[in-house]
Amino acid sequence: MKKLYFLLSCLLTISSFGQVFTEDFNYADNALLSANGWTAFSGAGTAPVDVGASNGLNYTGYSGTTGFTASAVGNAARLDTTGEDVNKNFASSVTSGSLYYTFLVNIASGDAGYFAGLLSSGTTFSNRVFVKPSTVTGKINFGLSNTSTAIYATTPTDFDLNTTYLIIVKYDVTTTGNASMWIKATGIPATEAAAGTPEVTVSGTVPATASGFFLRQYATAQNITIDGIRIYSTWFNAAPCSLVLNAETRVCEATTLSLDTYTTTIPFTGGGTATYTMSATSGTISGDNPSTAATGNIIISGVSEGTNNTLTISGGCNIVKTITAPECKPINTLPFTDSFPYTVGNSLNNEQKWSILNTGDNIVASTGNLNYTGITSGGNSISFGGAGAESKTLFTNTTTGSINARMLVSVTDISGITADLTGAYFAILTDNASSLTNARLWVRKNGTQIQYGIGAATTDVVWDATLYATGTTQYLVLGYDFSNNTVFLCVNPTIGGTTAPTATYTPTAAITGVGGFVFRQDSATLTPTAITVDELTIDTALNFTLSNQSFSQIDGLKMYPNPAKNNLFIETALNSDINVSIINVLGKEVINSKVSNNAVTISGLTPGMYIVKITEEGKTSTKKLIIE
């Protein structure tokens, strides 16, 4: 939409005290945004974003000389392919308070993806506005997220194609990234309270800053028109209220396996100048009264964990504060076991033993069990696949000895995987904060079968050499040995027996502590379409003997040197007939021979880590060997 340049400057001055950013795309037809103050941050020069030929959007009360923007309908930005993405910085970054950004949008067609939002810092984005086709033909849904994974309402509202809507997003500029979005087909709500319930409310860790606005072309199938962007520090640039609510803190009143409650403390300044009425959607309000106190804390207690809350203040001014609920879930003790005895169809993240680590389609409880000789299954199981949310459980942090996670796994569908031999990791032993360590369990498609491995990235995964048919059950053990900085994988060990690892991996940096476990969904084209998991146990001890940690079965056993290069020497108390089997990290036996004069020739082996299995008079011991 093109500005009317004859507008009085005093009018502009009066209405811009809270203005952060404005854009009406009043450039020549077919002009490029990158030539008019916008910067290409991705795909520069490829299908650049331009403005349309008199395709400005009209919304009564917002556009037009008598509307909020006081701008005539003219040109607008076109996001109609995939290619160049652009951003435009604010005059100065915003690091506190709230931001309200609004714009008009008309979607003729759209694949699932985000197309606009705030630049938080550098090339870090937040408040991303998403669109996706609805399950109803010819309809669309809008979503919002601080990450690249969309969040939509539990029951999203259906909106029409080829219709102009007013998007309103509120963002509390804090590290918790609280944000709400409204989509209006008519009218401009006079206050935030009058806007009603947001379409979707989100939160997520982001930098506590907003430095610009971005537009993104994410798919060739999209055809999106954007116009009339306005960003202010108040609701539609209303006069600022003297009462200011600062970033809240949320504290769990308990952390148990039962449903707990939490308390929110909201510091305020600028009180004592008017009479205010306060209400909350849940909990009890106490603390200081902003009607009489200049500064203080508003306290809301007794709100159930998992229940978002909204504080509404009216009177001297209108303020709506959205509070995202924390999770009040305990740190579990070891050994930790879960047979997933949950209601079928429920999200694993809603259970008290588990927390959500990301957003998207949830891992859910599924009916039935997986079976393995020596393990008695109970409860139900869980199923997941493709892209979506991660589920994390915390337990007592372990820093010495070893830690392992054991589970039954069945990959039942790999139809969505588009490439062989790439893989994705779907389970991780991690720390007790938020990072994903290198103790990662991978799966990949290999022809019509699957393969398991361990590693940090696709380029260094050590794969178990055995291939498995889909629909079969494997008993997988993912572990970490702190003493030797070794991640190990055992596939289908004998319960109560002795088992050598089927794969081992040495992280570049030693892992200092493990206090969490994550089930992960990577992407629809890398993660199997369907994975079932059952009978998870996490412990510092194994229910079978890991043979590369069993060194005392043969009396007087000595193996040297280690590392070795040409010859390996083996001595025992008996010095009887000794047989040696050497296995590489892929689980393949590379040497099987008798020991002659206490020596075995190893000069033909590639440098790396091996497992040496030594047998004498029916006794067997296993040691690790490094070949230089």
Image (spheres, rainbow, N blue to C red):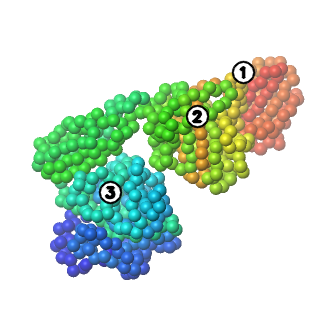
The answer to whether any part of residue 433 appears in the image is: no
Q: Is residue 24 above or below residue 191?
A: below
- Structural distance between the alpha carbons of marks 1 and 3: 68 Å
Where is residue 416? Give x, y as percent: 61, 53
Instruction: Find numbered disc 3 in the image and state the secondary structure of the residue it sits on.
Output: strand
Q: Which mark is residue 210?
A: none
- Structural distance between the alpha carbons of marks 2 and 1: 41 Å
Q: Nearer the viewer, mark 2 or mark 1?
A: 2
Marks 3 & 2, CB-CB < 8 Å contact: no
Mark 2 burial class by Cα count in 10 Å: few <14, some 14-19, many 20+: some
Q: Residue furthest front?
A: 137
Relative to 178, 317 lies left or right: left
Amino acid type of disc 1?
A: Ser
Residue with the mark numbered 2: 368
Instruction: Find numbered disc 2 in the image and state the secondary structure of the residue it sits on.
Output: loop
Residue at position x 30%, y 51% in the image: 197
Return the residue nearer the eye: 399 or 115: 115
Q: Which mark is residue 182?
A: 3
Which mark sits nearer the N-terminus, 3 or 2? 3
Residue at position x 36%, y 52% in the image: 200
Q: Nearer the viewer, mark 1 or mark 3?
A: 3
